[in-house]
Image (cartoon, helix red, strand yellow):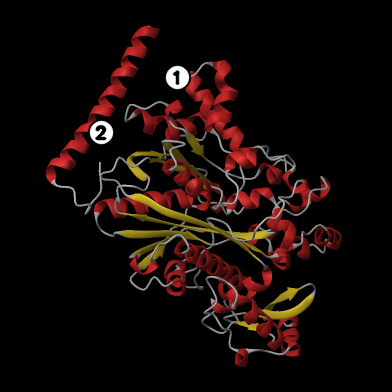
């Protein structure tokens, strides 16, 4: 009964419109000399104020609940939130100028160069940031624009521009190793910088990062060189700048499902007693910027995939208050499961619940693939979260726990509107950790299920699907080192077991009545 808990969760966005050309689709377009597309895309970029005022982004950083977002007029990009703030309960939306500065701060090999003028401007901005006021970029490490232009033109560096003006560059780390090219270094430093920002925002929620003793980084990028292309380690590099001096760590990769895998791994490490406080963190994916840009242009939709996203959470020993990660309820897509939608949902949702005597309707909320439908619908992918909820509801109907006429009511009551950017791993189950934790602590819900899914075929190694899930529940008040004596602890356990027995008895009676 002594499960690990979710101590908090943070979410950040870094607005990077001038990184749009580095997105994979734009890289392909540039090689194909599709200048028309690249020019049209540039015209549809949003200013920072619109990115901040976008309701889905405000929900991501905690200034709107998913319920409030669901009641906001659509399309959201035409219904900006009045007086929107860049800082939220869970994190922030960072402007590009500050992110370039954070990129430089994250660089320990002097691969990021900035102009003297930009450094002065950036230092002034950072001095006012609640988490980065201690960061001062060294003006002695500046580079003049002439030298930068020469590096960029020789393909030895990628440009950093602001409003069309060159303000810096990211240099290659090796002249022959493609894994250390300027483009890959830019991608990797972006993962690190956005991950650091997400980790730092846990401090805003009262968490002491000095007490973190293990870090799991779970983004979709992988750093290394020609001898170990995905060797890592983002985890320790992020922890180094975030102040996790007592921590070690490693990277976990699983395409889109990696964050859900990481939550289960972290919970297992804590429950086993190997570590007391594990931070799960992920930075953003440059390759996914404007991933659906062509389809958005065709439908006259602004470029909504214009920011890097990051998240972090800390899983710790039971404190008697925070929601628990119930490691007895873990769904898994096994090698023998198959890839049909019904088989996937059965393995990830129904099967783990059945093992403990629960039914699908007993889960208050499902957090699945939380992609923003305003991004996916114009691209022909539909409303991904809603499709998942319908499949879950259909399975509940099939199992006799829901009437067919209740299907859409189930979707409304147990689903969550998608509000995450299509950054691959970021939407996969974890966006609701912060809101769900609050909802449990406020007494609005008792539990929610995190469902991560992934597409392993992307690596061309297997056609296998992937997925893992777990249930986050209200804490029953059983914790280590709480001062309870043995009698009190036994009483709590007895009460918890009685509750389970009553629930099973009630189900048996309902089944008997139906028969």
Q: CA distance from mark 2 to mark 1?
A: 24 Å
Residue 389 position, x and y percent, is: 55, 32
Residue positioned most to the left: 486
Q: Residues within 10 Å of mark 2 (few under 14, many from 20)?
A: some
Quarter placement of the N terminus? top left
Task: Answer with left or right where residue 426 lies relative to residue 1.
Answer: right
The answer to whether residue 319 is seen in the rendering is: yes
At a point 44% along the width and 32% down the height, the residue shown is: 363
Q: Which one is in front, 98 or 349?
A: 98
Mark 2 residue element:
helix
Residue positioned most to the bottom: 140
Of callouts 2 and 1, the N-terminal one: 1
Task: Answer with left or right where residue 48 lies relative to residue 507.
Answer: right
Quarter placement of the C terminus? top left
The reply to whether the C-beta atoms of the residues labelled 2 and 1 are less than 8 Å apart is: no
At a point 25% along the width and 44% down the height, the residue shown is: 478
Depicted 323 relative to depicted 337: above or below: below
**Quadrant of residue 358 in the image?**
top left
Residue 183 position, x and y percent, is: 64, 72
Q: Which one is in front, 215 or 71?
A: 71
Task: Answer with left or right where residue 20 lies relative to residue 410.
Answer: right
Q: Which one is in front, 139 or 111?
A: 139
The residue to which callout 2 is attached is: 496
Mark 1 residue element:
loop
**Quadrant of residue 489 in the image?**
top left
The answer to whether residue 417 is seen in the rendering is: no
The residue to which callout 1 is attached is: 401
């Amino acid at each position: 009964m002594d499960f690990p808990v979710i101590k908090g969760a943070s979410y950040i966005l870094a607005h990077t419109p001038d990184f749009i050309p580095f997105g994979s689709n734009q890289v392909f377009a540039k090689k194909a000399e599709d200048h028309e597309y690249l020019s049209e895309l540039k015209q549809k970029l949003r200013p920072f104020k619109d990115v901040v005022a976008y309701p889905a982004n405000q929900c991501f950083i905690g200034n709107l609940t998913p319920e409030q977002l669901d009641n906001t007029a659509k399309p959201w990009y035409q219904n900006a939130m009045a007086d929107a703030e860049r800082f939220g309960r869970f994190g922030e939306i960072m402007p590009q100028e500050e992110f370039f500065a954070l990129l430089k701060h994250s660089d320990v090999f002097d691969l990021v160069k900035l102009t003297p003028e930009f450094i002065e401007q950036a230092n002034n901005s950072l001095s006012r940031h609640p988490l980065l006021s201690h960061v001062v970029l060294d003006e002695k490490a500046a580079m003049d624009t002439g030298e930068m232009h020469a590096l960029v033109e020789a393909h030895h560096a990628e440009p950093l521009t602001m409003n069309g003006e060159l303000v810096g560059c990211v240099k290659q780390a090796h002249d022959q190793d493609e894994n250390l090219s300027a483009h890959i270094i830019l991608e990797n430093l972006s993962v690190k910088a956005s991950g650091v920002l997400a980790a730092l925002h846990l401090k805003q929620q009262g968490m002491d990062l000095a007490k973190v003793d293990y870090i799991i980084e779970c983004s979709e990028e992988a750093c290394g060189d020609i001898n170990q292309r995905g060797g890592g380690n983002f985890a320790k590099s992020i922890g180094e700048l975030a102040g996790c001096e007592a921590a070690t760590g490693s990277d976990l990769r699983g395409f889109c499902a990696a964050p859900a895998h990481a939550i289960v791994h972290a919970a297992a490490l804590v429950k086993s007693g190997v570590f007391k406080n594990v931070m799960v963190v992920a930075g953003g994916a440059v390759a996914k910027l404007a991933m659906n840009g062509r389809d958005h242009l065709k439908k006259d939709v602004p470029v909504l995939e214009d920011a890097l996203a990051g998240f972090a959470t800390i899983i710790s020993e039971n404190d008697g208050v925070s929601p628990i990660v119930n490691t007895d309820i873990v769904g898994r897509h096994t090698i023998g499961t198959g890839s049909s939608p019904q088989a996937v949902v059965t393995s990830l949702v129904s099967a783990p619940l059945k093992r403990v005597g629960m039914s699908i309707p007993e889960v208050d909320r499902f957090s699945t693939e939380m992609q923003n439908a305003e991004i996916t619908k114009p691209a022909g992918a539909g409303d991904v979260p809603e499709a998942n909820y319908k499949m879950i509801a259909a399975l509940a109907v099939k199992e006799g726990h829901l009437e067919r006429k209740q299907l859409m009511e189930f979707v409304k009551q147990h689903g969550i509107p998608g509000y995450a950017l299509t950054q691959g791993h970021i939407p996969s189950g974890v966006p609701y950790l912060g809101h769900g934790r609050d909802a449990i602590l406020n007494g609005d819900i008792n539990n929610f299920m995190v469902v991560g899914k992934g597409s392993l075929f992307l690596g061309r190694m297997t056609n296998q699907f992937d997925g893992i899930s777990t249930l986050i529940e209200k804490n029953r008040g059983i914790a280590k080192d709480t001062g309870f004596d043995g009698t009190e602890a036994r009483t709590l356990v007895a009460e918890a077991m009685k509750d389970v027995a009553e629930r099973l008895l009630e189900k048996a009676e309902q089944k008997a009545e139906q028969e």
